[in-house]
Every structure is written in structure tokens, then in C-alpha cells.
């Protein structure tokens, strides 16, 4: 109830995200927190969909197989670290993932073995600061450049390198053909 979540960008997108929640429910997942019922500002302005938590999601459900791009968290349960790692690495997407542990060895193993572009260790949403690239790996990355970091600067700007060397002023400079006022 204390979550702050703004509206989605369009009615079409809000309805698409809500349809994933419907599909998860119809496929047998458990809707723990239902954002479809959220009323913000009286529910009249904006395309509101509250945070949603869906549990007991299986790998054949659309709430697992698709990137939803909405306030929906799907929980897929596994029995071991190795099963969890295989679950993440076998996905066609590789945007972001996180591990919560007090075991430094497990954390190091996870960061080295997981095939994902943004990794959080005891951080729920591993979205980087602007000076790091954003976008992930596999089918989660669009285009040939990331949006932030030096790759973003290179993508959105035209760099220029200027190398200068100044001669001693006694040299008198270079005659560029302009009239000289002596």
C-alpha cells in the first residue's frame, strides 16, 4: 500500500500489462497482490495499474516467457541454486536479475555464472546509474548500442579530437594572408 507507482504511458499499454495478469491467473498462477484494482487519484486521470505480485508461475506461462514492461513481479520457484541458475540462463532474455544471500561465495559464483546484463546482489532492481550501460543481454537489448554510459555518449554525439601545440610567441605566428596592422 505504500508503493509509489506512476501511471503507464497509454491505455493500450496498461491494458496489455493487465492482460498478462489475467493470463497468469487463468493459467493457474496465484495473484498475491493485484494491481488491476488500484484506484489512484480517484482512478479518473491516467492509465493506472498498481504493483502486482504473481506467485507459482511456471516457465510455460506468458507472465514468464514475455518481458511485460509493467509493475508485475512473477515468482517462479525452484529447488536449488543450480536450478535457479539454469532457469535464468536458459531464458531468451537477459535484462536484469538479482540474488539475495548472506553467502559471499554464492554471490561471487552467481555474478560470474549468470548470463544477464544487469546483476543485483542483495539489490532488488539492478538498474544502473547513468554512467553504466543499460539494456541487458540476449533479446533484451535493442540496437547495437546501450542507452547510457560511454556507449550512449558515442551513440548520441559526434566526437571530435583536437590536438594542439603552441609555438613560442617569439616565432611570430603564421602568415594567413590577412592585412597586418603594424
Image (spheres, helix red, strand yellow):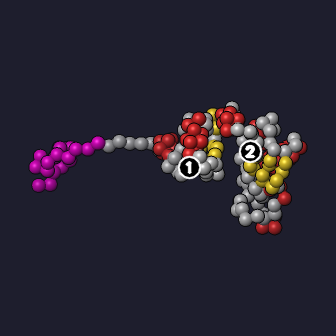
Q: Is residue 40 above or below residue 19?
A: below
Over which residues does the magenta segment extend? 163-182
Q: How many residues crowd around disc 1 within 10 Å: few (fewer than 14), some, or many (20 or more)?
A: some
The residue beneath circle 1 is 128
Res 68 label: 2
Q: Is residue 93 above or below residue 166?
A: above
Q: Is residue 164 magenta?
A: yes
Of residues 166 and 59, the one drawn nearer to the viewer in this rendering: 59
Residue located at (63% from left, 43% from top): 96
Q: CA distance from mark 1 to mark 2?
A: 20 Å
Q: Are marks 1 and 2 in contact (CB under 8 Å)?
A: no
- In the rendered image, residue 99, in percent from the top left (x then y), is placed at 63, 46
- In the rendered image, residue 163, in percent from the top left (x then y), is placed at 29, 42
Q: Secondary structure at mark 2?
A: loop
Res 92 label: none
Of residues 58 and 24, the one drawn nearer to the viewer in this rendering: 58
- In the rendered image, residue 125, in percent from the top left (x then y), is placed at 63, 50
- Mainly helix, strand or loop, the magenta region? loop
Q: Single out the mark in the foreground, 1 or 2.
A: 1
Q: Which is more N-terminal, label 2 or label 1?
A: 2
Residue located at (81% from left, 63% from top): 39
Q: Report whether 24 appears left or right of 90.
A: right
Q: Is residue 173 magenta?
A: yes
Residue located at (76% from left, 46% from top): 74
State the image quarter where residue 107 is shown: top right
Residue located at (56% from left, 49% from top): 128
Of residues 104 and 62, the one drawn nearer to the viewer in this rendering: 104
- In the rendered image, residue 30, in percent from the top left (x then y), is placed at 84, 48
Q: Secondary structure at mark 1?
A: loop
Of residues 121 and 151, the one drawn nearer to the viewer in this rendering: 121
Amino acid at each position: 500500500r505504500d508503493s509509489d507507482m506512476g501511471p503507464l504511458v497509454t491505455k493500450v499499454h496498461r491494458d496489455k500489462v493487465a492482460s498478462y495478469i489475467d493470463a497468469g491467473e487463468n493459467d493457474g498462477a496465484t495473484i498475491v497482490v493485484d494491481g488491476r484494482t488500484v484506484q489512484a487519484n480517484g482512478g479518473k486521470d491516467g492509465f493506472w495499474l498498481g504493483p502486482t505480485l504473481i506467485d507459482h508461475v511456471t516457465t510455460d506461462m506468458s507472465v514468464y516467457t514475455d518481458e511485460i514492461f509493467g509493475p508485475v513481479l512473477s515468482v517462479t520457484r525452484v529447488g536449488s541454486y543450480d536450478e535457479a541458475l539454469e532457469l535464468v540462463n536458459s531464458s531468451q532474455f537477459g535484462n536484469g536479475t538479482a540474488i539475495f544471500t548472506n553467502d559471499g561465495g554464492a554471490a561471487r559464483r552467481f555474478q560470474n555464472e549468470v548470463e544477464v546484463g544487469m546483476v543485483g546482489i542483495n539489490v532488488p532492481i539492478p538498474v544502473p546509474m547513468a554512467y553504466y550501460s543499460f539494456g541487458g543481454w540476449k533479446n533484451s537489448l535493442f540496437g547495437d548500442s546501450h542507452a547510457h554510459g560511454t556507449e550512449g555518449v558515442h551513440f548520441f554525439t559526434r566526437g571530435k579530437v583536437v590536438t594542439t601545440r603552441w609555438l613560442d610567441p617569439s616565432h611570430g605566428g603564421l602568415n594567413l594572408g590577412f592585412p597586418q596592422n603594424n
